[in-house]
Amino acid sequence: MAEQLPLPQRTVIDGIQDDSGAIEVRNDLAYLKTGIVNIAFIGFPKSDWVMVDAGIPGYDSEIIDAAEARFGSFATPRCIVLTHGHFDHIGSLEPLLERWEGVPVYAHPLEIPFLNGGKSYPPPAARAGGGIMTLLSPLFPRKPIDISGNLLELPADGHVPDLKDWKWIHTPGHTPGHISLWRECDKTLLAGDAFITTRQESAYHAIVQTPELHGPPRYFTQDWNAAHDSVRKLAGLEPDLALTGHGKVVGGAELQIDLHLLADNFVSIAVPE
């Protein structure tokens, strides 16, 4: 199997970090690292805002603190958008919804069964290789949560509620209803786990986050043909900045080059033997 393609260090977008730990990478876009996964805050400081994903379990207090530091005391999002329903992206969602009562949560229709108590994700591929995270993946939660009272389907026309400049793009493969968010005016991409910028299968790389372009986490990806098509689709957008579910924010011409290289060599780079 070919080596993963490295991203040059100069493509990392350092951003501006506030006291809460959130890092601003656009004037109206910041992210917070919750353990091994990123969540996004979309909105200018002290204004209305939308949250994307909800991190791993146990981070609800840190998420609330970061949101209030950026948007004001008792700040409540207009809505929450989920790229998908894996445990590391919805882990703190239920306690957050207890605090943010009535906030709608949007997901793709194909992801709804994993969020309304209807269906568990399939078992992980524990022999997919890459490191200790893959070997430990059978221990990761797969059962659905039930947030039916807040849950809504994303609009079929591709627009994102409360985000007029953004659209959602169906990027399946990692999960059936995985989505990414795209803003054309400044070519900003929130890719979820359609591709990521660290070697998530390795505990060391998941912690250190050496900036490298990778396919979706191997152990939980369900359909590699669909995942390949999704990376091709995102490469065709020519993003200038990408915030992924795992890893550092990257951008510039090197991102575009490496994303095309990933798309063109996806089988040898991303797909397990």
Image (tube, rainbow, N blue to C red):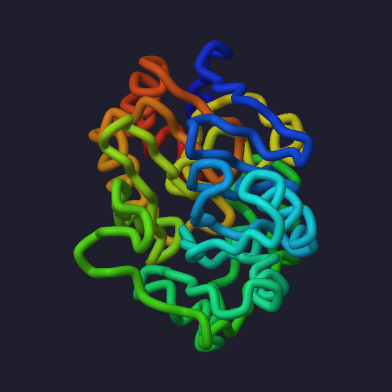
* Residue sticking out furthest to the left: 157
Q: Taking 121 as reference, is 133 left or right? A: right
**Above or below, comparing residue 67 to residue 248 in the picture:** below
Return the x and y of residue 170 as percentages of the image width and height: 31, 57
Residue occupying the point 65% across, 48% down: 37
Is residue 134 visible in the rendered structure shown here? Answer: no
Name the side, left or right, on which 227 lies relative to 219.
left
Residue at (36, 54) in percent of width and height: 163
Q: Quadrant of residue 152?
A: bottom left
Q: Is 137 placed above or below 187 here?
A: below
Apparent side of residue 67 relative to residue 234 in the rendered image (left or right): right
Whole-percent x, y for residue 197 in the image: 54, 33
Up the image or down, 203 lies above or below 223; here it is: above
Q: Nearer the viewer, residue 181 or 80?
A: 80
Q: Disc count in the image?
A: 0
For this rendering, which residue is in front, 260 or 104? Answer: 104
Name the residue rendered at 55%, 46% in the picture: 245
- The image shows residue 4 at horizontal and vertical percentages of 52, 27
Can residue 225 be seen here? The reply is: yes
**Residue at left offset 66%, top offset 51%:** 72
Image position, residue 231 (x, y; %): 34, 41
